[in-house]
Amino acid sequence: MSLTGTKYNTTADLWAFFQRLLEQIETLPGVEAAAYVTSLPLEPGVDLPFDIEGRPENNSGGAQWRSITPPYFNTMRIPLQAGRDFAEADDISAPGVAVVSESFVRRYWPGQNPLGRRFHFAFDNFRFAEQDRIVIGVVGDVRFRGLEQQSEPQVYLSYKQLPDRSATFYVPKDLVVHFSGDTTALGPAIRSIIQKADPELPT
C-alpha cells in the first residue's frame, strides 16, 4: 500500500488502520495470520549506524531495520529464540524496545545474553533515533539481499513506537499473509477489504 495524506498523519491513525485491516483479513477462510512490514525478505532494508551502551561511540556498528506490526514473526514463521515478541503495551509512551536477529547477537554480543542490552541509532536528524532501545527478544535469521548472501544483522521495531511523522518513508506498506487453501480468491478478497476501508488507497 501507499499511505500518504493527512488522514494517515499520525502513528495512532496508521496503527488503528492497520489493526482494522488485519482483523478483517484474518477472518478470511484459510488465513492463519497476517501482518505488515516495511519491506519483504529479499528486499534490502535501510542500513543505520547505532551506538551500543558500554562501547565507544562511533565504534559500535550498523544493521538493517524494519518496522512491523504484530504478529509479523508468527506470520513469517520466524522463530523466537529468546525473550519475547512485541506486546500491545509497547507503545509510544513505553520504553523503546527492539527485537534483533541471531546474526546481530553473534556480531555484537557473542557468547553473551543480549536481553536487556541497550543501543540507540546514531542519527541526530531522525526523531525515532532519540530513544534508547532495549533488546526484548531474539529471532531467527532471514536472508534479505539474496539466497546466496549470508544473513545480516537485523533490528525490528514496532511501528507503534515510532513518533508521529518520523521515518515516514518507512511506514509498513507490505502485507504478509500465512495462508492455506486456494489462493485464487485470496488476492481479490484482500483488495476488497482494503478498498472498502479507503477507496482512494492505491494497492
Image: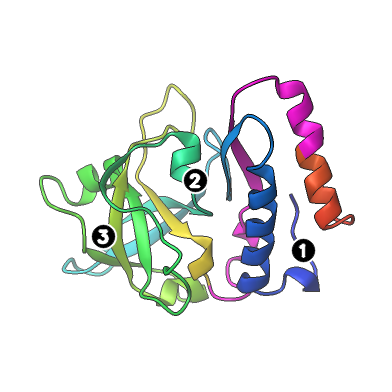
- Is residue 144 visible in the rendered structure shown here? no
* Quarter of the picture holding the C terminus: top right
Q: Amino acid at mark 1?
A: Thr
Q: Going by the image, does 53 lie left or right of 179?
A: left
SS category of the residue bearing label 3: loop
Pointer 1 with pointer 2, Cβ within 8 A: no
Q: Amino acid at mark 3?
A: Ser
| Residue extending furthest toward the right | 199
Assign a secondary structure to mark 1: loop
Between residue 89 and residue 202, name the one nearer to us. 89
Label 1 Cα crowd, 10 Å radius (few <14 / some 14-19 / many 20+): few
> Which residue in the protein does label 1 denote?
4
Identify the residue position indicated by label 3 in the image. Answer: 60
Which portion, as a residue range, is magenta? 163-189
Dot 3 or dot 2, earlier in sequence: 3
Q: Is 68 contained in the magenta span? A: no
Percent coordinates x, y for residue 158 in the rendering: 47, 60
Pointer 1 with pointer 3, Cβ within 8 A? no
Q: CA distance from mark 3 to mark 2?
A: 28 Å
Residue 71: x %, y % from top left: 49, 48
Q: Is residue 170 magenta?
A: yes
Residue at 83 percent of width and 43 percent of height: 192
| Number of numbered labels in the structure image | 3
The residue shown at (63%, 29%) is 30
The circle on residue 72 is 2
